[in-house]
Amino acid sequence: MTKKRSKSSQLWMKEHFDDEYVLKAQKSGYRSRAVFKLEEIQLKDRIIKQGMTVVDLGAAPGGWCQYAKKVLGNTGRVVGLDILPVEAIAGVELIQGDFREQDVLDQLIAVVQGKPVDLVLSDMAPNITGVSSVDLPGAMYLCELALDFSQQVLKPGGDCLVKAFQGEGYEDLVKGFREHFQKIIFRKPKASRARSREVYILARGYNL
């Protein structure tokens, strides 16, 4: 017997499949609508340049890796990591594992060692429960891990783009980025849903 979807689930499905960015992603061959968030930031801030080494945290289903590789062409390197499996992308190195676990972090660091990283991307978010007292701390923790990872692998002057959520702990997170980067920019791409509290922190010019 097929389980009947809830009304809220039905509304989400309708919104999703009517979404202009979902349709645009399908037509363009990208794996997710989120690629257009990165594209808008790239067009404004030129964070991806040929020859760069780029690490994408929370890479599934692979849209950001696809876009970064497209910009880099045959130059540079893209390494993606996610707890979920990501279908192979030509020219992209993929690691499956939980970024919160030390052995997975060690594996990622081992893969990128030998050449400093120019750009860390993080579109990571926890599994949403709908309970803000649980979801927000989980999201902040992932941002903090991304910042810590950036400090370990970024070259001087490197950049970091992280998805964060406004709320408790957000100001402290921004303060942490300000301590280690020369310039902080906030972006709310058009592809971000209006009701979402997500904001992208673009930290530029890493200071060792």
Image: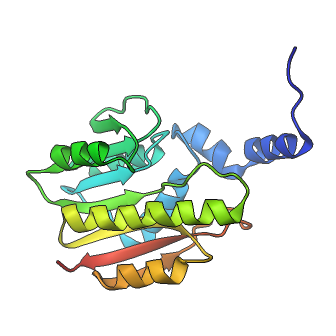
Q: Please identify the quarter of the rendering in which residue 5 is found.
A: top right
- Where does residue 153 sit, x and y in percent of width and height? 20, 61
- Where does residue 1 sit, x and y in percent of width and height? 87, 14
- Quadrant containing the C terminus is bottom left
Q: Which of the two residues, 184 or 178, is positioned nearer the viewer here?
A: 178
Q: Which of the two residues, 101 or 93, is positioned nearer the viewer here?
A: 101
Q: Is residue 160 above or below residue 205?
A: above
Q: Residue at x 51, y 51 (%)?
A: 35
**Colour convention of the picture:** rainbow
Question: Number of labelled discs?
Answer: 0
Q: Please identify the quarter of the rendering in which residue 79 is found.
A: top left
Q: Residue at x 65, y 69 (%)?
A: 197
- Where does residue 198 sit, x and y in percent of width and height? 60, 67
Q: Residue at x 28, y 80 (%)?
A: 180
Q: Is residue 139 left or right of residue 24?
A: left
Q: Is residue 78 left or right of residue 42?
A: left
Q: Residue at x 54, y 41 (%)?
A: 28
Q: Is residue 41 above or below residue 112?
A: below
Q: Is residue 64 above or below residue 164?
A: above
Q: Is residue 172 above or below residue 52?
A: below
- Where does residue 65 sit, x and y in percent of width and height? 38, 45
Q: Please identify the quarter of the rendering in which residue 170 is found.
A: bottom right
Q: Is residue 71 visible?
A: no
Q: Is residue 84 visible?
A: yes
Q: Is residue 56 left or right of residue 205?
A: right
Question: Residue lying farthest left?
Answer: 114
Q: Is residue 150 left or right of residue 126?
A: left
